[in-house]
Amino acid sequence: MAAASKQEVEGDVHKPVVKQSPSILALGKLFPANPTLDHAVRFLSQVRGTDKTLMVVQYFSKIFIWYFLKRGRDSTAQRIKNLAGPISDFRILLRYYGLLPLVQWMQYVDNNPSPSPLLLLLDRLQNICNLVYYPLEHIYWLGAHEVIPISMEKTNKIAIWSCRFWAAYVLLQFIHLGEEYRLYKARVQSVKAQIKAADTKAKETGEPADKTVYKSELASLKAEKLGIIINTIINTGYLPLTVHWSLEKSSFPDVGVGMFGGVAALAQFYVAWKSS
């Protein structure tokens, strides 16, 4: 047994170590580990991440097109149009599954308590808007690509009506955000009142007040306020676009669509990136 153990130890000691020689094929060593790269891969592998990335390109392309046309570089502007067109078309196709999460959200709204009766009403009205918007957009896309036999005139009318329901959703969202902010302020005042009461009690008893819970609540409220601000920016960006696309004849310039849509796109990209 001792001899065998000795041989095993010697075998481990004299075990040859294989050294990897440098190779010009080891290209992976040129790229050090990068958490931002991992985040980007995770972000772009989701439908939401891909959509928001393409949304940024789609709307900012309109600004670039306007810029190059102003400088007489028509060919460059046309090449950007050639890119922006398929991106816009693909983003509509990418929303093919939109009704599924909508049904989930409708179930949640009607089976869970709402912070206020007004928010419950607004959520239900917005769900009705989306319940009409998505099928109309799907029919528009299928008609525009001649998958279903619809005349171009009817296809355009369907597109306009889908945008009208989107515009209604956006208008309701402003009221929704106003109610969210009212409830936010009420909660902030409630937490501050609790902190003040805790301080008063600490002075009376001479024991320090434990404010850990209050600090956590204030941090949560701070994040909620940021969410309200960002959603207000997104909604403000969408409002002129939805009104513009809801009209049969609109004089709103395409560069304006790019500017307002670009603001909404960047804000949505930020939210999607942070949550991925």
Image (cartoon, helix red, strand yellow):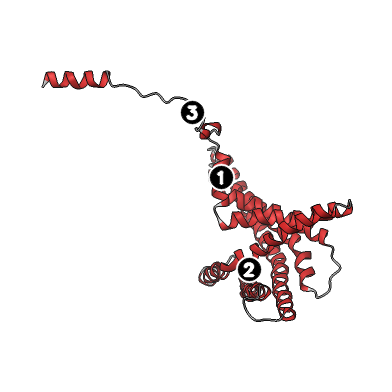
Q: Answer above or below: position of 274 versus 234.
A: above
Q: Mark 3 vs mark 2: which is more N-terminal?
A: 3
Give residue 37's quadrant in the image: top right
For mark 2, what is the residue?
119
Q: Secondary structure at mark 1?
A: helix
Q: Answer above or below: position of 237 versus 147.
A: above
Amino acid type, mark 3 = Ser
Q: How many marks?
A: 3
* Circle 3 crowding by C-alpha within 10 Å: few under 14, some 14–19, many from 20: few
For mark 3, what is the residue?
23
User: 37 or 81: which is nearer to us?
Assistant: 81
Which residue: 79% across, 68% down? 244
Q: Mark 3 vs mark 1: which is more N-terminal?
A: 3
Spatial separation of the CA atoms under disc 1 and disc 2? 34 Å
The nearer-to-camera label among 3 and 1 is 3
* Circle 2 crowding by C-alpha within 10 Å: few under 14, some 14–19, many from 20: some
For mark 1, what is the residue?
39
Which residue: 50% across, 32% down? 26
Q: Mark 1 vs mark 2: which is more N-terminal?
A: 1
Left or right: residue 234 versus residue 211 is right
Where does the image place residue 11, in percent across and percent down from the top left?
Answer: 23, 21
Can residue 193 be seen in the rendering of this structure?
no
Where does the image place residue 161, in percent across and percent down from the top left?
Answer: 72, 77
Q: Answer above or below: position of 157 versus 33.
A: below
